[in-house]
Image (cartoon, grey):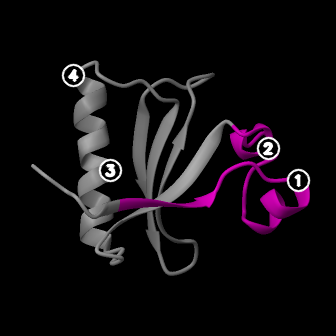
Amino acid sequence: HEFPDLTFHVTSWCRDAAHNKRAGGVGNSQHLVGGAVDFKVCMHNNCTDDLNYSVYKRIIELSKAGFIKFGQCIWYHSDKVGHFIHLSIPGNHVNQFFEKV
């Protein structure tokens, strides 16, 4: 498939402890050391939930096939925390994926 207008919008990357706490992050969050990134995927400047969920599912497929390795891949989809994908580098967790509502 060709996606010439696909863009990734980073919503959170490296943040200090106060910002991490305000964002609802845990005390040992990889965001504190720059080891995690939250992002939205957009096409033609439109960041739809369907598109982001499709990318989340594709990341899982690529990890199961052995093409990529990550710590956690989380699909957040709620009005409280927003709608985005979280990816962290491998550490204590390797290729864990789940959805949070």
Callout 4, which amino acid?
Answer: Ala
Residue at 29% from the left image edge and 75% from the top image edge: 44
Q: Determine which of the numbered discs, if any, sits on residue 32 in the image.
A: 2
What's drawn in magenta, residue-wise?
A: 7-34
Mark 1 and mark 4: span between their CA atoms? 36 Å
Q: Secondary structure at mark 3?
A: helix
Q: Could you tell me the amino acid type at mark 3?
A: Tyr
Give how far apart the Cα atoms at labels 1 and 3 are. Answer: 27 Å
According to the image, label 4 marks what residue?
A: 65
Marks 1 and 2, how far apart in space? Answer: 7 Å
Density class for disc 3 (Cα within 10 Å; few <14, some 14-19, many ≥20) is many
x and y, in percent, of residue 30 in the image: 70, 39
Of the image marks 4 and 3, the number of the one nearer the N terminus: 3
- SS at badge 4: loop
Q: Is residue 27 visible?
A: yes
Earlier sequence position, callout 1 versus callout 4 = 1
In the rendering, which numbered label is found on residue 56?
Answer: 3
Q: Is residue 31 magenta?
A: yes
